[in-house]
Image (tube, rainbow, N blue to C red):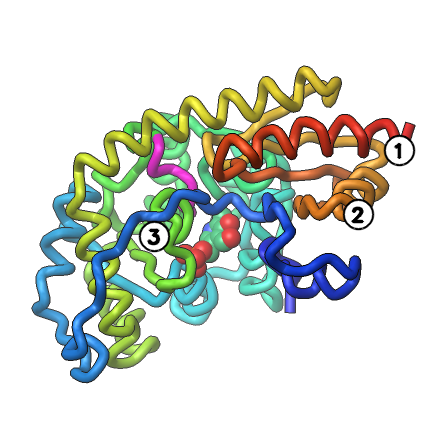
Amino acid sequence: MLEHGGRLRRAAARHGIPLADWLDLSTGINPVAYPVPPVSAEVWQRLPEEDDGLQEIAAAYFGTHELLPVAGSQAAIQALPALLPGARVSLLAPSYAEHAHAWRGRAVHQCDAAGLDAAVDRSDVVVLVNPNNPSGVHFARDSLLEWHTRLARRGGWLIVDEAFIDAEPGASLAAQAGLPGLVVLRSLGKFFGLAGARVGFVLAPAALRLQLAEALGPWAISGPGRHAARHALADRDWQQRMRHKLTADGARLAALLQEAGLGSVSGPALFKWFAHPRAAALHEALARRGILVRLFDTPASLRLGLPPDEAAWTRLRTGLSAALHDIA
Ligand SMILES: Cc1ncc(COP(=O)(O)O)c(C=O)c1O
């Protein structure tokens, strides 16, 4: 099992701090989740049905009908390697580690954002996250489309994981979905804050969607998951408000970290990331104060999600200043 953010119970046991006393900033999940309306008894009781309107609502949200709902984008990350041919796979690094894990066994070449352009011509499959987690690197749509063209004319594939793109939908390749050789992954977990619902979408050509649906089997998403997704994806007012709020909060978090002297900070609205030579010590000093952030080893760095409310912003500011003092 790979390391992930959100392992609050483990941190609580390790530091002897009760669960309720933690400020968990260890994921990039929106702390203000979409308020899902109550689920009726029937939704719990009946088998989910595919003609419940989710397909049309999701098509309107993503701007394409070329989509397949899956049980979190993670389900697709794990299933795609068995369906896509090609020996040579290039992966963006550092990035969401589940991609490298899923492609193990192929000739995998990991490269940084600057190395991807050259990697395209010696790859059958290129996998990247846009905007990247945790580095926050953004890829321009034009570059991605150009890489896709170069790959697709040789029968290759470009997989773009857009788990963190919903606050800036103009950067998405969703509208191009259906092109041969292009897979776009979307998640309901981050922007909508509904990671527990386990809903994601694969935007891809029909033949690949069919193979994926076969591989994942019937009722891939639970009835309550489909209910949450239908409501969240249809609520344009909430989405609009949340885009503004997250953009402002993201800028506020970057400013807070920079004012604390943490240097160059990057990341999309939902999280910020910075390299620090003493990242592990800072992670530990914050945890002693009940503030959980995500530690990365390569490079030594920390990622922080958004505080949920004003009390949490104050707690982060004071806790960070004390933790930096501890490790000085
Ligand atoms: C970049 C990225 N992609 C995909 C996922 C998986 O998300 P989910 O399966 O909840 O859609 C994550 C989760 O952290 C992620 O960070």
Q: How far apart are marks 1 and 3 (CA)?
A: 38 Å
Q: How far apart are marks 2 and 3 (CA)?
A: 32 Å
Residue 31 falls in which quadrant of the image?
A: top left
Residue pointed to by mark 2: 288
Within-10-Å neighbours for mark 1: few <14, some 14–19, many 20+: few
The kind of residue on which mark 2 rests is Arg
Mark 2, ligand 1, within 8 Å: the answer is no
Q: For residue 166: magenta? A: yes
Question: Which residue is located at x 37 percent, y 31 percent?
Answer: 146
Q: Residues in magenta?
A: 161-167
Mark 3, ligand 1, within 8 Å: the answer is yes
> Given contact means CB atoms under 8 Å apart, are the residues at marks 2 and 1 in contact?
yes
Sooner in the amino-acid sequence: mark 2 or mark 1: 2
Within-10-Å neighbours for mark 2: few <14, some 14–19, many 20+: some
Question: Which residue is located at x 46 percent, y 30 percent?
Answer: 269
Quadrant housing the N terminus:
bottom right
- Drawn side of residue 254 relative to residue 285, left or right: left
State the image coordinates of residue 255 (x, y, percent, origin top left): 59, 18
- Drawn side of residue 56 relative to residue 284, left or right: left
Q: Is residue 156 visible?
A: no
Residue pointed to by mark 1: 326
Residue pointed to by mark 3: 188
Q: For residue 324: magenta? A: no
